[in-house]
Image: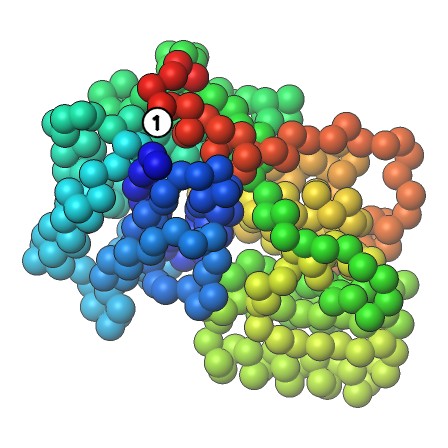
Amino acid sequence: MAKVLFYVQHLLGIGHLRRTATLTRAMQEAGLAVTVVSGGHEIPGLDLGGAALVQLPATRAIDESFKTLVDESGEIVDEGWKAERRERLLAVFAATAPDVVMTELFPFGRRQMRFELLPLLDAALAARPRPAILSSVRDILVAQAKPERNDEMLDLVERYFDLVLVHGDPSLIPFDRTFPHARRIADRIRYTGYVVDTSGRRGGPGSPGHDEVIVSAGGGAVGRQLLEAAIAAKPLSRHAAAQWRVLVGIAESDEAFQELSRMAAAAQAEDGRGALVVERARGDFPTLVSNARLSISQGGYNTTMEVMRARVPAVIVPYAAQAETEQTLRAELLQARRLLHVVPQTGLTPQALAAACDAATRPAADPATPLDTDGGPATARLVTELAAGRQV
C-alpha cells in the first residue's frame, strides 16, 4: 500500500484543512495510506476517512495580514518553538517513509512556514528511494504585491516539485490567470477539477435544512459582518416567512456567538415571521445546503463548491480584507455564468443582501455550464499512479 504524507497549515479560517480532509478521504478510499500533518488548531470531529493525523504544536495568525504567528497560548512564536516543530515534522517524515509527500498550498502560499517546509523538502529529495513531491493548490492565488514573490514560487517548484495539482477547472479560470509563471511549469501542472465534499444528502420535508435559508461564514472568525447583515436582512426579503439558520464559525468567541443570538432573538421578536436559528457551524453543512431554498455565504472555496454541487440558489459575499482577492475573483466568474449572485463586502447592507436574495431565487435566463467537480477522485487517481511509478 502506497504511503502519502500530507502537510497542511491553516492560519485563520479552516478551509485549507477541510479541503485537505476531503482529499484525504478520497485517497483513503482509493487504497492509499495517508498521514495528515496539521500545524493549525485542532478541529473537533474532523473526518479523515481513517487516515492518521499528526498534530504539530499549533499556530495561528493574529489577523488578516498573516504576518504575526502565535502559539496555542497566544505568545508570538520564537526560534526555539520553530526548531521544535521542525524536528517533530522531520521525525514524522522519517517514521512514515512516504512514497508521496504533498504540501497544501506551499509554495504558492504559507511562506511563513519555510522554516520547516524547506527542511522537509530537502529531506524528501535526499531520501532513497526518493518520494514523489506534489503541491496541492486551489484554483486562484492571492494577488502578489511584490512580483519577486512569484519568482520565488517558480524557483521552489522547479527545485522541489514533481507535480502541481491545481484543484480547479481551467474552463472557469486557468492557473496562469493568477500565477504569471504557470507556462514555465506547464509540464508539471495537472488540473484535477474542483474538490467538493460529496457527503450532502438531499431529502424531503423533515430533512436537515429543508426549505431553509442557510447563512454561513465558514469555520473561521472573520464572517461576523455577514451574519449580522443576514439577521437584519431577513424581514426585508421575500423569504422572511422561511426559517433562516445562521451558522457561526467554531473559531468565533462565545461572546460573539451570544451577541449574535441576542440580535436574532430581538429581530425575531420584532418581525415574527419564520424562525431565526443561530447555532455553531455544523459538520452536515453539505446536507443542509443540499436541502435549502437559498444559501447565503462568504466565498470560500469549499463552501462555494458545495453550493455549486447542490445547485441551490446562492448569494456570495466574498471576503476581501487586506489584499485578499481570491474569493472576489472566483465569485465574479461564477456570477458571470449565472451560477450565483454577488454582494461585495464593501457594499454589504441588509437592504443589498435582501435584494440579492430575492434576485437569486428567480429562475435563471438559461442553464449554466457545469463545472468539473471531480477533484477528490481525480487527485486520488493521480497520486496512486504517481506512487506506482507511472507517468502522469
Quarter holding the C terminus? top left
Relative vertical location of residue 349 with respect to residue 178 in this rendering, above or below: below
* Relative side of 209 to 19, left or right: right
Relative vertical location of residue 96 with respect to residue 353 in this rendering, above or below: above
Tell me if I can see residue 152 in this picture.
no
Q: Position of residue 332 (x, y in %)?
A: 66, 36
SS for dot 1: helix
Query: Mark 1 is on which residue type?
Result: Ala
Residue at image x 65%, y 30%? 372
Residue at image x 47%, y 21%? 190
Per the image, the residue denoted by label 1 is 387
Nearer to me, 299 or 196: 196
Q: Where is residue 50 in the image (x, y as percent from the top left)?
A: 43, 54
Q: Position of residue 6 (x, y in %)?
A: 34, 42
* Relative side of 121 to 377, left or right: left
Tell me if I can see residue 279 in this picture.
yes
Nearer to me, 63 or 183: 183
What colour scheme governs how the chains and residues are painted in the rendered image of this protein?
Answer: rainbow
Local crowd at mark 1 within 10 Å, few (<14), some, or many (≥20)? many
Residue at image x 50%, y 43%? 29
The extreme front residue here reads: 1
Quarter holding the N terminus? top left
Relative vertical location of residue 247 with respect to residue 277 in this rendering, above or below: above
Looking at the rendered structure, the number of numbered marks drawn on it comes to 1
Query: Which quarter of the figure has residue 79?
Result: bottom left
Q: Where is residue 132 in the image (x, y as percent from the top left)?
A: 29, 26
Residue at image x 21%, y 68%? 75
Nearer to me, 375 or 281: 375
